[in-house]
Image (cartoon, helix red, strand yellow):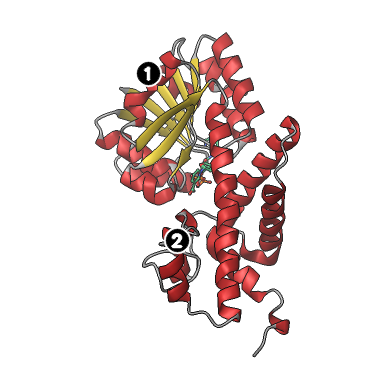
């Protein structure tokens, strides 16, 4: 298929590369010269404008930082809804708020396009290995059209429900992740203080009811699990700034819908404090280092 891919950053670049490997004809677009150069270095072709790229494309995928970028690319004066040929399948894989996802999809439908929200989980390693999970919001027919395209970039492709349901699933998942990571970090901080060996805690908890992804796959202390960000000075991985963004989206949704999420609210405050302390660019498991430093003066020597 002829596909336009907009947003060739940490996630978009390897995703677009996997579409090319699967035999699709991919035209890339990004406002950052560095991202464009990286795509060209892969052998990719860059469009001169949204109009050039979208004009001949059967599908367009966007992988942009936040809701405002998605609005600009779809709804702007020279945006996709004006430049894409009628009937083009539009897939937004950025993580954004539900209201923007629904508003842009409704505007796309009015302009004669099928649009899906299809945020992902799996991080940059999943993007590179084509093992992402896609959570898709939109119609059954749109999902059926998108599935073979998404299969070139991911392993689990789930239809979460109507428009916005993909973003809803993504923010619920990442609220669990933010809370569970803080729980695991707190357990290691406590273990250190009360004299329990980290490896022993890992061996026991990973086979007990405390087991979870944050412990098994992204263990926040160096040692028990090889190659996790904690073993390389918390280089992401999944940046704490992105976790904070997702937690804020969950709290916006909780406030709008009237859902009580006190732990989600608390996790948001912890990640805000951690970002203010200069750790936003580190992997989100850096919460261990942040919590470890708190109350240190009161810890027994
Ligand atoms: P990124 O900042 O690395 O990439 C975004 C790209 O979009 C940049 O290259 C930027 O130049 C480009 N861009 C911005 N505005 C543009 C415009 N108007 N037109 C064209 N290009 C534009 O971000 P990322 O890490 O690739 O994340 C992208 C999305 O995926 C975010 O919503 C993020 O929350 C989500 N996500 C990221 C991860 C991760 O581990 N990095 C995991 C899951 C989901």
Which dot marks residue 208?
2
Q: Is mark 2 on a helix, strand or loop?
A: loop
Residue 172 visible: yes
Indicate left or right for 73 with 88 as reference.
Answer: right
Q: How crowded is mark 1: few (under 14 residues within 10 Å), some or many (20 or more)?
A: few
Q: Nearer the viewer, residue 204 or 126?
A: 204
At 48% from the left edge and 79% from the top edge, which residue is drawn? 197
Q: Quadrant of residue 248?
A: top right
Q: Name the residue tied to disc 1.
A: 144
Q: Is mark 1 on a helix, strand or loop?
A: helix
Q: Nearer the viewer, residue 22 or 187?
A: 187
At 69% from the left edge and 59% from the top edge, which residue is drawn? 270
Q: Is mark 2 within 8 Å of ligand 1?
A: no
At 37% from the left edge and 65% from the top edge, which residue is drawn? 227
Above or below, comparing residue 37 to residue 19 in the picture: below
- Image location (x, y in percent) of residue 148: 31, 25
Indicate left or right for 249 with 150 as reference.
Answer: right
Is label 2 in contact with label 1 (beta carbons under 8 Å)?
no
């Amino acid at each position: 298929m002829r596909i336009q891919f907009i947003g060739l950053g940490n996630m978009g670049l390897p995703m677009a590369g996997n579409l090319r490997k699967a035999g699709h004809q991919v035209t890339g677009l990004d406002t950052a010269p560095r991202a464009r150069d990286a795509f060209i270095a892969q052998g990719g072709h860059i469009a001169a404008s949204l109009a050039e790229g979208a004009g001949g494309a059967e599908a367009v995928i966007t992988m942009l930082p936040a809701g405002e970028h998605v609005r600009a690319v779809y709804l702007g004066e020279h945006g996709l809804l004006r430049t894409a040929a009628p009937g083009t399948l539009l897939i937004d894989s950025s993580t954004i708020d539900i209201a923007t996802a629904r508003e842009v999809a409704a505007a796309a439908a009015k302009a004669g396009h099928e649009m899906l929200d299809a945020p992902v989980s799996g991080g940059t390693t999943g993007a590179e290995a084509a093992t992402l999970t896609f959570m898709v919001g939109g119609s059954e027919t749109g999902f059926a059209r998108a599935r073979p395209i998404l299969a070139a970039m991911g392993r689990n492709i789930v239809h979460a429900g109507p428009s916005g349901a993909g973003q809803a699933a993504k923010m619920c998942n990442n609220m669990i992740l933010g809370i569970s990571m803080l729980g695991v970090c707190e357990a290691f901080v406590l273990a250190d203080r009360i004299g329990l060996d980290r490896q022993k805690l890992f061996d026991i908890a990973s086979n007990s009811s405390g087991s979870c992804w944050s412990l098994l796959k992204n263990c926040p202390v160096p040692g028990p699990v090889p190659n996790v960000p904690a073993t390389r000075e918390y280089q992401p991985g999944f940046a704490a700034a992105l976790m904070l963004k997702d937690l804020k989206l969950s709290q916006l949704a909780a406030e709008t819908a009237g859902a009580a999420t006190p732990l989600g609210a608390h996790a948001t405050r912890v990640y805000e404090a951690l970002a203010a302390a200069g750790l936003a660019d580190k992997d989100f498991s850096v919460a261990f280092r942040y919590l470890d430093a708190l109350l240190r003066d009161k810890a027994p020597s």
